Amino acid sequence: MNQIQFQHGLSLHEFMRDFGSEQQCEEALAKARWPHGWRCSHCGCARFFHTRNGQGRLLWECFICGYQGSSIVGTVFENTKLTLTVWFLALYLLTQSKNAISALELKRQLGVSYPSAWAIKHKLLQVMLAREKQRRLDEQVQMDDAYLGGERAGHIHGGRSTVQKSAFIAAVQTDMQGRPQVMRLDPVAGFTKEALKAWAAQALTPSAHVICDGTACFAQVRAVGATYEPHVTGSGRLAVQMPMFKWVNTMLGNLKTSLSGTYHSIKHKKYAARYLAEFAYRFNRRHDLAAMPARLLRAAAMTQPCSIPNLRKSETHC
């Protein structure tokens, strides 16, 4: 029995007990945002009293300068017209399901419009992306090149330059016993020396040992001090079955299953980084499923707001 797969997690009953009311959600958000107590962002004063605005939103008003602010200002929740209970349920659904949850399914579960569900999902995916960008892989790292998408009927484009595909790098850090620890899934402009050098500077530590296939550009990981162990695999099933690539191939298979089982289609040219980060975020925190909603809440409370127009452009505009 796999202990990670059969862990307790956070049941819906437990979630509703702890976050079923607006007051409970407000208290949890305030604690996540100000773990050491509220301080005025204008004058630094710690003295305040509570009031409410015309929409009934709870406000903190500074005793000294009179500045008023709510718990959602300066977070991804800023300017929302939805209750916090809706947002908290979205946090729960995005973190507790084995696979992802589509915006359409989120619409049904939350009882909101599709545009609202899409905005909630992508704002929270942007939070996950911001967290995963900070991760740097160390020790042994299995690495491979991969693509999202495919050909349109009637279009013929060959090789790595296929215009209907989005290239990304899959990298899994393993311990000395070969067990997977954490991973990164990062879109790249292409498998070029420049793209790989930029990726390695962001994703790897100098002490990392990269195990990869014979793709020439992968040698650029040495630019950050990482060691490089290429294995020429050729094509076909032999490459998939090689033991030194076991976990990166397993993760790519799980990713494909998750995406195809959740989404009818995704605009991977614009939003690939968010969908990939969603999968990596859940995997990297799989050891404590019950704590994942609280961790995502803390991250959301610390993440700057992103407007809907910028959200729809791409992840780089937020």
Image: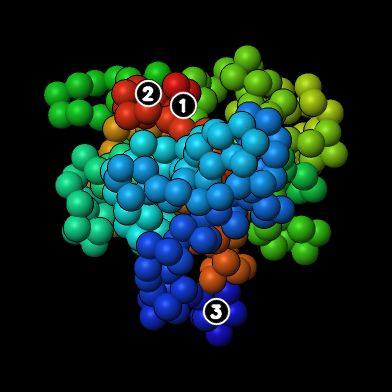
For the question of whether residue 249 can be seen, the reply is no
> Which residue is farthest left?
154
In contact (CB < 8 Å): disc 1 and disc 3: no
Q: Position of residue 50 (x, y in %)?
A: 50, 51
Residue beneath disc 3: 7
Q: Which comes before the other along the chain, label 2 or label 1?
A: 2
Residue beneath disc 1: 318
Identify the element where label 3 is drawn. Answer: loop
Q: Locate the N terminus by quadrant.
A: bottom right
Q: Judge whether 300 appears above or below 13 on screen.
A: above
Amino acid at pointer 2: Asn
Q: Which of the 4 quarters of the picture holds residue 86?
A: bottom left
For the question of whether residue 209 can be seen, the reply is yes
Q: Position of residue 145 (x, y in %)?
A: 53, 35
What residue is rendered at 51% in x and 75% in y?
A: 9
Front-most of residues 118 and 61:
61
Front-most of residues 57 and 48:
48
C-alpha gap between disc 2 and disc 1: 6 Å
C-alpha gap between disc 2 and disc 3: 38 Å
Amino acid at pointer 1: Cys
Q: Please, which colouring scheme is shown? A: rainbow
Amino acid at pointer 3: Gln
> Which residue is farthest bottom?
1
User: Callout 3 environment at 10 Å: few (<14), some (14 to 19), or many (20+)?
Assistant: few
Q: Judge whether 214 appears above or below 182 on screen.
A: above
In contact (CB < 8 Å): disc 2 and disc 1: yes
Check residue 310 in the rendering and tell me which mark sits there, or answer none: 2
For this view, does 317 lie left or right of residue 56? right
Q: Nearer the viewer, mark 2 or mark 3?
A: 2
For this view, does 196 lie left or right of residue 97? right
What residue is rendered at 26% in x and 55% in y?
A: 106
Q: Position of residue 272 (x, y in %)?
A: 41, 34
